Image (cartoon, rainbow, N blue to C red):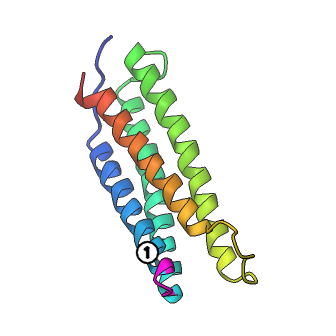
C-alpha cells in the first residue's frame, strides 16, 4: 500500500458536499414550514454545489493523472479511483433526484400520504455526504 498524494481540491469538495447538505436541509425545512417559494432556490443551490463537487472530482483525477497516478498504479490509487467514481455516480443520481423534486413543485398537488420528494432527496443527499466524509477519511486521513 503506497499512499497517494491528496489533491487539496478534495478538502474543498468535502466542504461543497457539506454545504449542499445544509442547502437541502434548508429546502426541507422551508417546505415543512409551508414557505414553498424558498424551496426551489435551496434545491438549486444543492444542485449547483453537487455539480461543483463533480467538477472538483474531475479536477482531482486530472491532478493525479498528471502526476502519473492512475487506476493500476497502486492499491491506494485503485481504491481511490474506484470509490470516488462510484460516489460521483451516486452524486449524479442525486442531482437527477433534485431535478425531479424541482419538477414536482409545479405538478398538481400530491396525493395525501405520498412521500415528500424534497425530504427524500435531502435524506439521500445527507447519506451521500456522510459516505464521502467516510471515504475521504478512510483514503487520506486515517491511514
Image quadrant occupied by the N terminus: top left
Vertical arrangement, residue 15 with respect to residue 136, above or below: below
Front in this rendered view, residue 107 or 63: 107
Q: Can residue 59 be seen in this view?
A: no
- Please tell me in which quadrant of the rendered image residue 52 appears: bottom left
Name the spot of residue 3 as percent of width and height, x first. Answer: 28, 19
Q: Residues within 10 Å of mark 1 (few under 14, many from 20)?
A: some
Name the spot of residue 4 as percent of width and height, x first. Answer: 30, 23
- Please tell me in which quadrant of the rendered image residue 74 appears: top left
Total numbered badges shown on the rendered structure: 1
Residues in magenta, as a range: 31-35
Reply yes or no: does residue 33 show up in magenta.
yes
Image quadrant occupied by the C terminus: top left
Name the spot of residue 25 as percent of width and height, x first. Answer: 42, 67
- Please tell me in which quadrant of the rendered image residue 22 appears: bottom left
Name the spot of residue 17 as percent of width and height, x first. Answer: 38, 54
Question: Quick check: 130 left or right of 121?
Answer: left
* Element marked by disc 1: helix
The residue depicted at 40 percent of the width and 60 percent of the height is 21
The residue depicted at 33 percent of the width and 36 percent of the height is 136
Farthest residue, direction front: 113
State whether the magenta stretch is mostly helix, strand or loop.
loop
Q: Is residue 112 visible?
A: yes
Reply yes or no: does residue 105 show up in magenta.
no
The residue depicted at 56 percent of the width and 45 percent of the height is 90
Question: Quick check: 51 left or right of 142?
Answer: right
Front in this rendered view, residue 78 or 25: 25
The residue depicted at 42 percent of the width and 38 percent of the height is 62
Q: Name the residue under label 1.
A: 29
Vertical arrangement, residue 11 with respect to residue 136, above or below: below
Front in this rendered view, residue 82 or 98: 98
Farthest residue, direction top: 1
Amino acid at each position: 500500500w503506497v499512499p497517494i498524494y491528496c489533491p487539496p481540491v478534495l478538502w474543498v469538495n468535502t466542504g461543497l458536499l457539506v454545504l449542499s447538505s445544509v442547502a437541502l436541509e434548508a429546502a426541507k425545512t422551508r417546505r415543512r414550514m409551508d414557505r414553498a417559494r424558498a424551496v426551489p432556490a435551496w434545491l438549486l443551490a444543492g444542485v449547483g454545489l453537487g455539480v461543483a463537487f463533480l467538477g472538483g472530482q474531475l479536477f482531482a483525477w486530472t491532478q493525479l493523472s498528471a502526476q502519473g497516478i492512475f487506476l493500476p498504479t497502486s492499491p491506494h490509487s485503485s481504491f481511490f479511483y474506484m470509490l470516488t467514481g462510484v460516489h460521483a455516480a451516486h452524486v449524479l443520481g442525486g442531482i437527477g433526484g433534485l431535478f425531479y423534486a424541482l419538477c414536482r413543485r409545479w405538478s398538481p398537488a400530491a396525493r395525501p400520504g405520498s412521500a415528500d420528494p424534497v425530504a427524500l432527496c435531502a435524506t439521500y443527499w445527507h447519506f451521500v455526504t456522510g459516505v464521502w466524509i467516510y471515504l475521504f477519511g478512510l483514503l487520506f486521513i486515517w491511514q
